[in-house]
Amino acid sequence: MARLRLFANLREIAGTGSVEISGRTVGEVLAAAVEYFGPEFAGGLSMAQVWVNGVRAGDATTVGDNDEIALVPPVSGGTSLARSPMWMEVSLVVAVVAALFIANSLGIQALAITTVLAGSLWVWDVTDVAGRRGVFIGAIPLVFTVCGSVVVSYRFGIPGMAAATVGGGLFALVWAVVTPRLRPLDSVAGMVVLAAVAGFGCGSLMLLRLRSKEEVTAFLLVATLSVAASWIAGSVEVTGLDPFTVGIVTALGAGGVAGALWSEDLWPMIVASAGAAIALVAGRNLGSLARSGGFYLIGALPGSLHYLDGVMMAAGTFWLMLRLVG
């Protein structure tokens, strides 16, 4: 049986967020769901988007026992969890990456300001998308974590980053306790995990800059080329071309180039790049869970800055691996 995941008003009507229903196609599964949950469910279903394993699907799409069908209804105002226009995604990501490259070349203060802005934009994007599907995550504690981690990492180094990461998670936990709509377990868990990722990622970028400007440039190069290669591989119709394998291979190549250009020892940079590439995949998983409620390794994710999900986690991994083996 396929697993049917329900969000927003459909989850409220059904009284559950997940149910297993038999059917060979999406249409058969949805028909069985309507028969089981009733006419009110059918009314909400008529406006919902249908996703199978993270990819938009129609009634004729075949499903098996291990497939997951997500029904994502619109929210108030007619906005839905559709993917942002491609030009918006590309433009925003290019602008953020370009700003980080430029700020890094100007100095650590400029990089600190730009990191806060980029981290805050990412927080706004992921919390907004999560809220649309009915999982409310407070943006305020996450933004405070971003700001605090950048400042204390710049001022106190590793102890500051560690304190900000742990403190951000605790602050998010307290914020959830005092805010009624943030008390559900999925909201609390999302806030704490995202706060830890934001604090670790943004703080680690500052720690990299304290080591050298070249290491920040190397990380930005590895992350940019890896994400771009994964996106291209996922966009072209080539059988057997796995976007994540392409991204990892690209990261290793970029790490080799960066090590040859800016490091006295090649291998630490390659090892750090490999760690960053794996973290990019892990960050994609985290982002898909926060944005869509499931682990979708393929297909589009809602939001305009979902490409930064992996970058936030990769920054900390890149710094940590360099520190361990460099």
Image: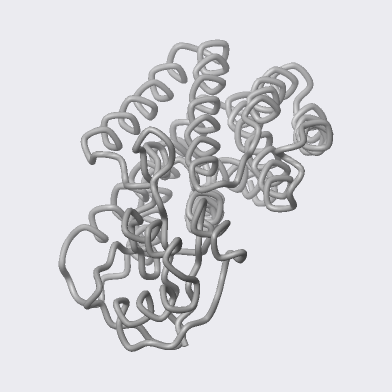
**Is residue 126 visible to the viewer in this orientation of the structure?**
yes
**Horizontal relation, residue 226 to residue 199: left or right:** left
Give me the residue at 27% from left, 36% from top. Answer: 90
Q: Against 105, is 258 above or below?
A: below
Q: Position of residue 55 (x, y in %)?
A: 32, 64
Front residue of 238 and 270 = 238
* Colour pattern: one colour
Front residue of 186 and 233 = 186
Looking at the rendering, which quadrant does residue 236 occupy?
bottom left
Q: Position of residue 60 (x, y in %)?
A: 22, 78
Q: Position of residue 128 (x, y in %)?
A: 50, 35
Give me the residue at 72% from left, 39% from top. Answer: 182
**Horizontal relation, residue 244 to residue 56: left or right:** right
**Horizontal relation, residue 195 to residue 271: left or right:** right
**Is residue 274 visible to the viewer in this orientation of the structure?**
no
Q: Against 141, is 186 above or below?
A: below
Q: How many marks?
A: 0
Q: Position of residue 100 (x, y in %)?
A: 43, 24
Furthest residue toward left: 237
Front residue of 125 and 256 = 125
Looking at the rendering, which quadrant does residue 308 occupy?
top left
Give me the residue at 70% from left, 17% from top. Answer: 151
Furthest residue toward front: 39
